[in-house]
């Protein structure tokens, strides 16, 4: 397992993106699950939800089966057939799964560490018809115009569901919340797009709800961009200018080893009085998942800054948060 975790954080390497005026690094970082206890409960079962005409429980179960890190399944999902078999044998209705003790009894019978149950609320939908004003040219040069109205329809749909996750061994609730999702669509007579049917719109909301809930239960990869500094902050010699320029070019070519050596040479050449190479080296280390080293270089850069530099200040705060999240994610993966 330790080898697996090591591989996972090796995967949190950088993808380098270059565009606009500033050179940027896109970093992939593994962050811990929002619901910590859920992430540490790996053997789960999803009970049939009450009033679930949209198949929300099936969508959640499918998501959990598909959840993978490093191409390995994160959860062991107990078959719905096994769950339903126990429900039938014990003569338990879905409404009976509101009682925590009943859920615990069922969980013990099927060998689950946690059971997810819920109830889908009554879906809502509303169509509103109205007119929008348009303007059209009456001649080629558009010297004369006329206004006219077109008919439009706005469709609003909403969906809510109560979802909870019960810890079988402790007999308590890991998570409980009411999720609400809404969507709005508009179609005018002069527009070729179509409004989805109420059923289709509700299915999309159910998919969103299942995705949002499932993503709370396990670590997730997050991608974000970090700007590199490309201008000297102190007076550079021509050789030092070349070192900075070359280091940025090697980063662009994904030659981090070479870029790191050049930045270290630049740090030594400027007698550690320039925060630019220290910051850029911190970015490289952060992209490689070496958060402790990144924090060291960001702190050295921050110590040299007199007036606030947004990139340095942001990195200094961000890396402390990432170190804490990194620790939590590893703990979740090792359980």
Image (tube, rainbow, N blue to C red):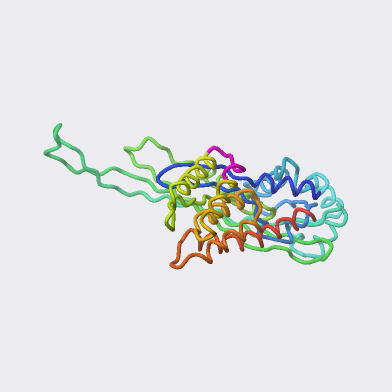
User: Can you see residue 124?
Assistant: no
Residue 21, position as x, y percentages in the image: 40, 46
- Is residue 50 visible in the rendered structure shown here? yes
Of all residues, the one furthest to the top in this rendering is: 140
Q: Position of residue 120 (x, y in %)?
A: 63, 55
Residue furthest left as drawn: 143
1 displayed left or right of 160: right
Residue 264, given in percent of the width and then of the height, sits at 58, 51
Task: Identify which residue, 299 or 12, lies in the foreground.
Answer: 299
The answer to whether 325 appears left or right of 237 in the picture is right
Using the image as rendered, state which of residue 31 and residue 24 is in the foreground: 24
- Residues in magenta, as a range: 253-259
Residue positioned 51% across, 56% down in the render: 270
Magenta stretch holds residue 254: yes
Indicate the position of residue 155 as horizontal and vertical percent values.
Answer: 43, 48
Give the image quarter of residue 179.
Answer: bottom right
Residue occupying image coordinates x 88% and y 54% = 109
Tell me if residue 74 is in the magenta stretch.
no
The correct choice, above or below, for 155 with respect to 121 in the image is: above
Number of marks in picture: 0
Residue at 75 percent of width and 49 percent of height: 5
Say which quadrant the C terminus sits in.
bottom right
């Amino acid at each position: 397992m330790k080898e697996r975790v090591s591989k996972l954080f090796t995967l949190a390497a950088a993808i380098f993106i270059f565009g606009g005026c500033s050179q940027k690094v896109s970093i992939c970082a593994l962050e811990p699950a929002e619901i910590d206890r859920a992430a540490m409960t790996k053997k789960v079962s999803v009970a049939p939800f009450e009033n679930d005409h949209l198949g929300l429980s099936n969508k959640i179960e499918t998501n959990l089966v598909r959840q993978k890190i490093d191409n390995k399944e994160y959860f062991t999902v107990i078959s719905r057939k096994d769950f339903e078999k126990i429900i039938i044998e014990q003569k338990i209705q879905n409404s009976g799964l509101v009682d925590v003790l009943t859920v615990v009894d069922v969980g013990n019978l099927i060998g689950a560490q946690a059971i997810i149950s819920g109830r889908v609320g009554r879906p809502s939908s509303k169509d509103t018809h109205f007119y929008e004003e348009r303007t059209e040219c009456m001649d080629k040069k558009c010297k004369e115009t006329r206004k006219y109205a077109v008919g439009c329809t706005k469709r609003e749909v909403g969906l809510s569901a109560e979802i909870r996750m019960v810890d079988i061994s402790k007999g308590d609730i890991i998570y409980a919340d009411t999720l609400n999702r809404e969507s709005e669509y508009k179609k005018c007579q002069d527009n070729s797009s179509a409004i989805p049917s109420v059923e289709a719109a509700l299915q999309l909301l159910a998919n969103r709800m299942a995705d949002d809930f499932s993503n709370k239960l396990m670590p997730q990869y997050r991608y974000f961009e970090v700007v590199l500094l490309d201008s000297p902050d102190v007076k550079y010699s021509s050789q030092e200018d070349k070192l900075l320029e070359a280091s940025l070019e090697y980063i662009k070519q994904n030659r981090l080893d070479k870029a790191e050596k050049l930045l270290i040479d630049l740090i030594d050449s400027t007698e550690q009085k320039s925060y630019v190479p220290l910051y850029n080296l911190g970015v490289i280390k952060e992209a490689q998942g070496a958060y402790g080293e990144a924090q060291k270089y960001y702190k050295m850069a921050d110590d040299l800054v007199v007036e606030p530099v947004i990139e340095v200040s942001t990195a200094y705060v961000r890396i402390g948060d990432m170190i804490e999240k990194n620790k939590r994610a590893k703990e979740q993966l090792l359980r």
